[in-house]
Amino acid sequence: MSFTRRHMLAATGMAVATAPFALRPVAAQEAGRIVVVGGGFGGGTVARLLAGAGHDVTLVEKNARFSTCPFSNTVLGGLNPMEAITFSLDGIAATGARIVQGEAVGVDGQSLMLASGEALPFDRLVLSPGIDLRFDAISGYDEAAAEIMPHAWKAGPQTELLRSQLEAMPDGGTVAICPPANPFRCPPGPYERASLIAHYLKAEKPNSKILILDAKDGFSKRDLFEEAWATLYPGMIEWVPFSLGGNVTSVDPAAMTITTDFDSYEVDVANIIPPQRAAAIAQAVGVADETGWCPVDGVTFESTLMPGIHVLGDASLAGAMPKSGFSANAQGKVVAAAIDAMLRGEDPQSPKYINTCYSLAGPDYGFTVAGTYEVTGGEIVSIDGTGGTSPLGAGEDVHAAEADYARAWYETVTRQIWG
């Protein structure tokens, strides 16, 4: 695919994701009670749209402010402060949604139960709770170990901890990044993380090294990342795939050692990203299957296991769609429209989806993968002949433009949800 065609697809994807979107006002007799769990890219979108249309919406979020995983790598690379990726829920409240800071723990009949004991009745329940980390998957790695070897795969204190460790590391140190096998949140994320940490180290600690110990033999946009590493950070980043011993089997936080199938490594900073599953509320409610993720209908994102409950974003099994902020935002618009139609007594329309995933290898070096999807037999599948990635061998001006597109998407979509 030529750059021109791919560039047009990415631009179209940005337009679809960020164009103004609103539901028509609902009549009082058609308004429903909707409870939404999770104030991120998916849940925040659903809550804002349905409340704006006049539905009775309650949004449950654990945190008073929401920090985004997209662009959290820019904090690790020193390009942004934590405040730049942290947002108040006041903008969602301004649309009429009730905001409840609390933890959802289960469902009793037609009510969502909170850890506080409060019951929130609903006509439709929307779960966009994100992920939980499987601390049982790597020997020696648990929540206590994560305070020494941070995962930073949920943005917030873990992001700040990993950044502080990078700042404290001596020049000449080794940073290990250990991604899991698929599926997991944001497939290109660990490799963007390696890139932006390398940007920081190149400027401040140029004798340091980044070691990627991977549970896979390939990764999203691999050719583009490796081209960027050779151009920007020659000799600084080493990727060890599964077949060459990259799979992490155990860690020792006290000794700062990582053991793989073939070897053992002593490092200065360890970013351990364990396998994942849908967050605990999805498990408690019964919308997750044996994979740990939540199967859904591709048109409405209604659970195939529990009718009346919609699951979207990273927690869902969304067919060919990747787990990304862009995907969750697009799914949020579809879910809001589907629920609105159901409450009005109408049939939801079969949607088409798009995902455009931007990656930054440096402040002015970006590239993209884009895909479009449709629903066939209830499953979300890729549309043949669409999608693509940035080309290899592109010039500096192309990479700079892609980096600008990434920043523009983030600024627009965050303002659209939380602004």
Image (tube, rainbow, N blue to C red):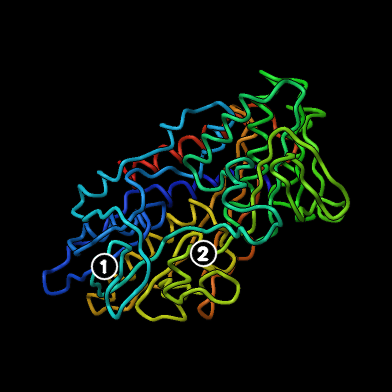
Which residue is more in the foreground, 63 or 400? Answer: 63
Residue beneath disc 2 = 278
The residue that appears at 24% across and 80% down in the rendered structure is 345
Name which of mark 2 and mark 1 comes first in the sequence.
1
Amino acid type at image mark 2: Ala
The residue at 51%/43% (across/down) is 70
Residue at the spot 48% in from the left edge and 72% down from the top edge: 298
SS class, disc 1: strand
Q: Nearest the camera: 289 or 118?
A: 118
Q: Which residue is mark 1?
A: 34
Question: Measured from the top left, where is residue 102 in percent x and y?
Answer: 31, 56
Residue 337, percent from left and from top: 32, 66
Looking at the image, which residue is at 47% across and 41% down? 156
Crowd rating for badge 2 (residues with CA inside 10 Å; few <14, some 14–19, many 20+): many
* Residue 296, position as x, y percentages in the image: 48, 74
Q: Secondary structure at mark 2?
A: strand
Residue 60 in the image: above or below residue 202: below
Q: Is residue 117 left or right of 351 when viewed as pictured?
A: left
50 is higher (above) or lower (below) than 260: below
Q: Which mark is residue 404?
A: none
Q: Quadrant of residue 46?
A: bottom left
Q: Where does residue 111 sit, x and y in percent of width and height?
A: 27, 74
- Callouts 2 and 1 close, C-beta under 8 Å: no
* Up/down of 397 relative to 308, above or below: above
Q: Is residue 392 left or right of residue 77?
A: right
Separation of residues labelled 2 and 1 (CA atoms)? 21 Å
Figure quadrant of the C terminus: top left
Q: Amino acid at mark 1?
A: Ile
Which quadrant holds residue 90?
A: top left
